[in-house]
Each structure stands twice: as C-alpha cells, then as structure tokens.
Image (tube, rainbow, N blue to C red):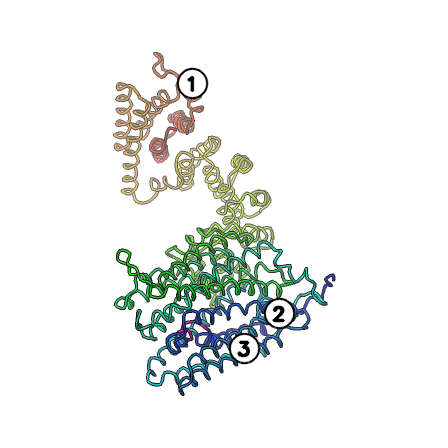
C-alpha cells in the first residue's frame, strides 16, 4: 500500500515542551531507582545467587530471558501501525511491567518464612521474563515518541542532561540500598522485601508521570503493514551493521556482567560488603554525572559514533579484576569505578542517539523495534553462554606469574575478546559527516576541557551579558572549538559587546563553519560590525570572502572599514588579492590606509610589495608612520612582528635590540658563507666589513655602517648568485641584482632593498631614517636562509 502524506502536526509551544522535558527527567529519576534494585544487575543478582543459592546457569538464564524478551519489540511494529497513538499502549504495558516486580517481594517473604529457595528462583525468572515481554512489546514506541518530542539539534544534549540527573538518582538509590542491606544483616530477607516493594512503587510512579507529557502525532504510513515494510530495517545495510555491532557488544558484556557483583560480595572470593557495590556505584555515577553534559555536547557537535566507540571501551576496566584480592579491593575497585564512569556515558547516552540518527522519521518505530529486538536477542546468547561457561569451569584455578586466575577471570577475558570484535564492527557503521575518534580524543585530552565545559554552561544559560562577554573574550585553544555552535548563536545577541566578542572569538578559533554566517552579516550594509567581521574573515583564511572584501574595499566610505578589509585581504593572500592591494598602494591614501595597505602586502612577501613600501617610508616625515612602514618592510624580509622590538620602547631597550640583531646577523652571515664554501680570504674580508659596520653603528654613524653593509651584500650575492664567483673582474651592482633575483631564496629582495637604500644615501639627512635603513639591512642578514 502506498504511503499517504499526512499534514504536519502543530509544533508544541516552547513552554509546554520545556515542562515535558523536565517531567521526563523527573520520571527518569524515579524509574532508575526501580532499575537499580529490580532488574537483574548488581543487587538482584546478589540476592538471587548469594542468598537464594542460584546456580550460574540460573543466573545467566534470568538475564538471558530478560534480554531475549526484546524479540517482542517486533510485535510493537504491528501494534503501533494499527494504533492511532503510542502513549496509551506504552503506559498500559509498562505499568503492568513494573507491577510484576511485586513478585520479588513475594519471593523474599516466601524464603524468609522457610519457603523453598528454588521455587523462589523460578518465580523470579518467570516474572522477570513476563515483565520484560510486556516492556519490549511497547518500548520502541517510547523512543520514537521521544525522538518526535525532542528536537534533534538538542536531543543528545537533553539526554546527556537527563542522564546526569538519572545517574544522581542511581547513585543515591544504589548506595542507600546497599547500605540498608548491610545494616539489616539480621533481617536481610525482610530488608530485601521492603526494598523491592518501595522501588516497585517508585517505578510505577515513573510511568504514571508521563500522563502529562504531550505526544506529537507520529509520521507514519496509514493502513496495515506489508511484509516489505515490516522487514525494511533489515535491508538497510548501515542500520543492520549497527544492530549487529550493538548486539555483539551486549553479548560480550553479558558474558561477564551478571557475575561481577556476586563475585565481589561472595565471602569465598573477594568478600567485599554490599556497601562496596554502593561505593563503586557512587564513584561511577558521580563521574558519569560530571561527564554526561560533555559527552552530550561532543555528540551534538561532532556526531555520535566517535563518542560511542570511546564509550564502548568501558568493559576493559574489568582488567583490574585480574589483580583483585581480598586485601587490595579497597584500592582497585575505586580506580575501576572511576575509569568506567568517565567513558561509559559515551556508550550509555550515545548508542541510542546513534540509533535514532540512523532511523528515518517515517518508520522510526519499526527501526527502533528491530534494533532493540536484534540487540537484545544477540545479547541473551552472552548471558546464557557466560552462565554455562562459569558453571563448566567450576573450581578452575591457574597461576600465571603474579596472577592467580579462577573461572571468573576466564569469563572476564572471554567477554573482553568479544568486546574487541564488536568494536571492529561498530567502526564500520556510517554516520554521515563525523569527526574521527582521534579528533575527539585530542579534545578530551586538552588541558582546557574542564574550562570549556564551564564556558558551555555560561554560553547556553540566560546569565548576564557581561559574564557572556567575558567568557567569549577568553575563549582560545583547541577544546574551545567545541563551543563554536554556541558562539554562532551569539552573533545576533541583543548586547553589542557580546556580538563583538563572539565575532572575535570565532576568528581566534579559526572556525571555518562561521564563514557563511559572517558573510551573511557582512553583506548587510546596515550591520554596524562589518569592520570586526572583515578582520575575522581574514583570520579564517577562507578564499570565499575575497570578492566580498574587495567589493567593500572599493565602495566603503569609512576609512576604518576599508582598513579592516585591507587587513583581511593581506591575511587571505592570493594573486587577485596581491594585485588589488599593490594597485591600491599606488594611489594617494590617508595615512591609516597607507599603513594598513603596506602591512597587508608585506604579509605576501613579494618584491613588488617592497617596491611600494620602501619609497613611501623614505618620503614621509611622520615619525610614527615611518616606523610602521619600516615594520611592514621588515615583514617582507623576514618574519612578521619580529622587527617591532627595534622600533619601540626606551632608548636602552632599542639599543639592546639593535645589539642582538647585529650579533644574529654576523653569526648568520658567517654560517651562510661557510656553507657556500667561500674562500678564506674573501670570508675574512666580508667578516671584517661586518665588524666595521657594527662599530659604526655603535658610534652612531648609520650612513657609514650602510656603506660597509653594501660591501657585505655584494660579497654575499657574488658567492651565492654568480655562476663563477671567482672571476677576476667583480660584477657591477646591476648584474649582481639580476643574478640574485634568480636565486631560489629572498636574496634578490634583500639585495634590491640594500641597493635602493645605498642609492638614496647622498640625499638622506635624517639620522632616524638612516638608523631604520641600517636596521632593515641587518634584519635581512639575520633571517636570510639559503635553500
């Protein structure tokens, strides 16, 4: 049957949506307390194995039947296709699912009054299986409901926040439950019964709270489902790979997970009190709480897959169990709990988000159902296999070096081998444009990651504009890249200072994804921050900005905006930019624009730039402008910004900088000439000329120093650029320049600069200008490198 389009549902008002999300978090906190106690995991597994004396096979069967019930997710596909809404069916089945936990109360009381333990075990197994059949028959409807309710742009962040609250509830309830059980050793079975009863009530309240949550109309085809539609998810290769990978991962974890808590609390093994399970839970959950917002932020920005892959490493913390003894568990268990808590959020919060990302909205319920069914059924094999393996190994023991291995350790190593296989399969799942795992690791390892998380809270909250501006002002470093989307949201902030700082922060972070949003605002003539945007566009280095900057430069009436465009074009480079800036310098310009143009073309490092800058430097009588142009000229000869120290500060500071510059130039000259195998007499002559230039500078005779430097430059060009430097008749300056211009280095640029200054010497009467010329000549010698 063909799909008939349905009209788009009316959006849920933001206020109502926020109330629904808050209600969702509260319900999740109540539900997790039920999960901690009433689901086969730590507390229930200890109760069944250590107090009811279940065999490893029975414990594995209990977990396996819970997981195999996931096959009933497929029934949900048919059910939800026929039902007009998801909410009533989900609530009815889940209320019964939770109420069946009263069977645990009955089992505990039955044994407390002398009843048969095996009967109690089978009661629990049967009730758990039926409970999760009901749960899985409607669970996919909840996930598709939440996917429709929570916007995708904030889904991972919301579920990360939800996980943080739920983990806090998990931590408190788990620790409280284990402490209660340790304190009630004399009436332990009654304590279990009371605990099961309380958590069943809270778990049922979790479901009832969703009565007030709205349900957007699902986007689904009308009519009965066909076989092709039913099996469509199985024909989706990427989705099928994900289901298989998650299933194998669940299988691997299920091989060992049901037996960890009983092993740790068994007096014949480690013998830790039940409270230690609570302590481990607290440490893991606390770490999870603090890291969950970070994982959510990472997933929303860089994709779910890298976070899921990293989170799937958490079973490898079980390797510490190989070294565990009754005397050292107080040290090793906290380390294991903290390590697991740091990465487990990437898996626990990410894998379902990855699944939802890969499911089409139209048939999301079907995809979710198949995902849960396949993952659950495959995982069940691990629980059964782990129980059988544990039982077959029996009292197995072996000593390998310092390690004393028992059957539990073999089960752990088996689980980790299967985990590694699942990771290889999970890595093949495609999720569109995502960053590689190495990128995510580098950001997580950044020293500023904690600061980044705090900054995220500031930028995403409704705090004062001053605090947001301060936060934006200090953003820098690789981990701050995680905040780019939050910074972009501040480009339209009502506060002018916040907008300015957001633009500048994007430039510092080199956020290439900001180019289009910035260009959109730059092209709006009424935008008051076009100059700030232009400078940031220059820092981003994206050539898409060049035509817009050139157009604005030619049309703008504001000197400030023109200067900003010139500065940006100098950073961007390119032939078109270079030609335009050089043509601009040939025009009569105001001094600020002249400096900006000179600085811009200087960054391009071309001889044409020097042709324009040096004459302007000699023509102006403005001391500050002359120094600015000298710095721009030095930028063409060496590295940007280094010449500044020679032109600023106090006289003693400038003198000290001049002395360092001369020493560097003399050392570099000797190194280059020796590398060129200059004959010793010629080398001695040139070094003597260099020493005389230094003495003349100390005697405040820059003109004399420049004449000596002319000799040095001629010798340098002769021995580096001439084909036969040992010819009898020395070449004249024009021939040397022509040869130097063809040398594969900046030799031609430096020699032209010195010749131009040398030709102007007779007409220069300004000692300051002569000093700047001499410093430029030394600066080139200190930075010149042959190839």
Label 3 vs 1, first from the N-terminus: 3
Front residue of 78/29: it is 78
> Is the residue marked by circle 1 packed among few (<14), some (14-19), or many (20+) residues within 10 Å?
few
Q: Are marks 2 and 3 in contact (CB under 8 Å)?
A: no
Q: Where is residue 358? Give x, y as percent.
A: 58, 58
Q: Residue at x 34, y 75 (%)?
A: 274
Label 2 vs 1, first from the N-terminus: 2
Q: Residue at x 37, y 15 (%)?
A: 724
Does residue 268 sit above or below 648 in this rendering?
Answer: below
Element on which disc 2 rests: helix
Q: Where is residue 411? Give x, y as percent.
A: 39, 62
Q: Which residue has dot 2 on it?
A: 76
Which secondary structure type mostly characterizes the magenta part of the structure? helix
Q: Where is residue 159? Give x, y as percent.
A: 51, 67
Label 2 vs 3, first from the N-terminus: 2
Q: Which residue has dot 3 on it?
A: 97
User: If the image is split into quadrants, where does the N terminus sit?
Assistant: bottom right
Q: Which residue has dot 1 on it?
A: 735
The reply, left or right, for residue 121 in relation to residue 216 is: left
Q: Residue at x 32, y 75 (%)?
A: 273
Residue at mark 2 to residue at mark 3: CA–CA distance: 15 Å
């Amino acid at each position: 049957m063909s799909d008939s389009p349905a009209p788009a549902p009316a959006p849920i008002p933001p206020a109502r949506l926020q109330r629904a999300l808050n209600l969702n978090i509260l319900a999740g906190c109540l539900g997790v307390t039920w999960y901690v106690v009433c689901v086969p995991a730590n507390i229930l597994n200890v109760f069944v194995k250590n107090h009811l004396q279940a065999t490893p096979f029975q414990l594995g069967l209990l977990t396996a039947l819970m997981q195999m019930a996931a096959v009933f997710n497929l029934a949900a596909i048919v059910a939800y296709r026929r039902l007009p809404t998801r909410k009533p069916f989900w609530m009815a089945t889940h209320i019964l699912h939770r109420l069946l936990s009263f069977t645990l109360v009955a089992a505990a009381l039955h044994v407390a009054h002398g009843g048969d333990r095996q009967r109690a075990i089978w009661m629990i197994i049967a009730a758990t299986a039926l409970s999760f059949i009901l749960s899985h028959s409607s669970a996919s409807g909840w996930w598709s409901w939440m996917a429709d309710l929570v916007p995708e742009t904030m889904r991972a962040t919301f579920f990360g926040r939800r996980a943080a609250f739920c983990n806090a509830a998990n931590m408190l309830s788990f620790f409280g439950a284990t402490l209660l059980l340790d304190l009630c050793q004399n009436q332990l079975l009654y304590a279990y019964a009371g605990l099961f009863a309380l958590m069943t009530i809270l778990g049922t309240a979790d479901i009832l709270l969703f009565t007030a949550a709205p349900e957007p109309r699902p986007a689904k085809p009308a009519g009965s489902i066909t076989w092709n539609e039913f099996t469509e998810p199985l024909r989706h290769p990427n989705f099928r790979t994900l289901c298989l990978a998650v299933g194998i991962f669940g299988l691997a974890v299920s091989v060992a997970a049901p037996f960890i808590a009983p092993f740790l609390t068994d007096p014949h093994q480690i013998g830790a009190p039940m409270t230690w399970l609570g302590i481990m839970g607290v440490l893991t959950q606390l770490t999870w709480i603090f890291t969950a917002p970070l994982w959510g932020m990472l997933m929303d920005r860089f994709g779910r897959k890298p976070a899921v892959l990293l989170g799937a490493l958490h079973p490898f913390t079980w390797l510490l169990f190989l070294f565990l003894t009754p005397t050292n568990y107080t040290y090793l268990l906290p380390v294991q709990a903290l390590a697991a808590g740091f990465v487990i959020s990437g898996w626990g919060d990410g894998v379902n988000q990855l699944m939802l990302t890969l499911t089409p909205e139209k048939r999301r319920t079907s995809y979710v159902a198949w995902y849960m069914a396949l993952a659950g059924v495959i995982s069940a094999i691990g629980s059964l296999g782990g129980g059988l393996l544990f039982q077959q190994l029996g009292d197995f023991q072996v000593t390998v070096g310092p390690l004393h291995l028992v059957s539990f350790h073999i089960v752990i190593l088996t689980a980790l081998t299967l985990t590694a296989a699942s990771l290889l399969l999970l890595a093949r799942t495609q999720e569109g444009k995502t960053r590689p795992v190495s990128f995510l690791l580098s950001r997580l390892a950044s020293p500023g990651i904690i600061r980044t998380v705090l900054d995220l809270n500031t930028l995403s909250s409704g705090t004062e504009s001053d605090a947001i501006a301060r936060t934006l002002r200090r953003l820098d470093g690789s981990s701050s890249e995680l905040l780019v989307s939050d910074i972009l949201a501040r480009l339209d902030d009502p506060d002018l200072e916040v907008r300015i700082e957001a633009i500048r922060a994007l430039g510092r972070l080199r956020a290439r994804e900001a180019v289009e949003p910035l260009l959109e605002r730059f092209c709006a003539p009424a935008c008051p921050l076009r100059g700030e945007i232009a400078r940031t566009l220059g820092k981003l280095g994206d050539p898409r900005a060049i035509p817009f900057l050139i157009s604005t430069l030619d049309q703008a009436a504001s000197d400030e905006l023109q200067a900003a465009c010139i500065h940006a074009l100098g950073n961007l480079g390119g032939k078109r930019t270079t030609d335009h800036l050089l043509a601009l310098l040939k025009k009569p310009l105001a001094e600020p624009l002249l400096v900006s143009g000179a600085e811009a073309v200087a960054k391009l490092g071309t001889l044409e730039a020097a042709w324009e800058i040096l004459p302007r430097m000699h023509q102006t009588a403005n001391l500050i402008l002359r120094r600015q142009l000298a710095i721009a000229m030095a930028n063409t000869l060496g590295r940007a910004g280094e010449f500044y120290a020679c032109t600023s500060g106090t006289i003693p500071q400038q003198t000290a900088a001049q002395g360092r510059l001369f020493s560097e130039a003399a050392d570099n000259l000797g190194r280059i000439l020796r590398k060129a195998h200059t004959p010793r007499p010629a080398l001695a002559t040139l070094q003597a000329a260099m020493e005389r230039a230094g003495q003349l500078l100390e005697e405040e005779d820059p003109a004399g120093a420049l004449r000596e430097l002319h000799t040095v430059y001629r010798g340098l060009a002769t021995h580096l650029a001439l084909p036969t430097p040992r010819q009898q008749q020395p070449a004249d300056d024009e021939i040397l320049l022509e040869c130097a211009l063809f040398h594969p280095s900046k030799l031609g640029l430096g020699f032209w600069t010195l010749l131009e200054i040398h030709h102007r010497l007779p007409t220069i009467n300004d000692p300051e200008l002569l000093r700047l010329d001499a410093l430029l000549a030394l600066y080139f010698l200190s930075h010149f490198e042959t190839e």
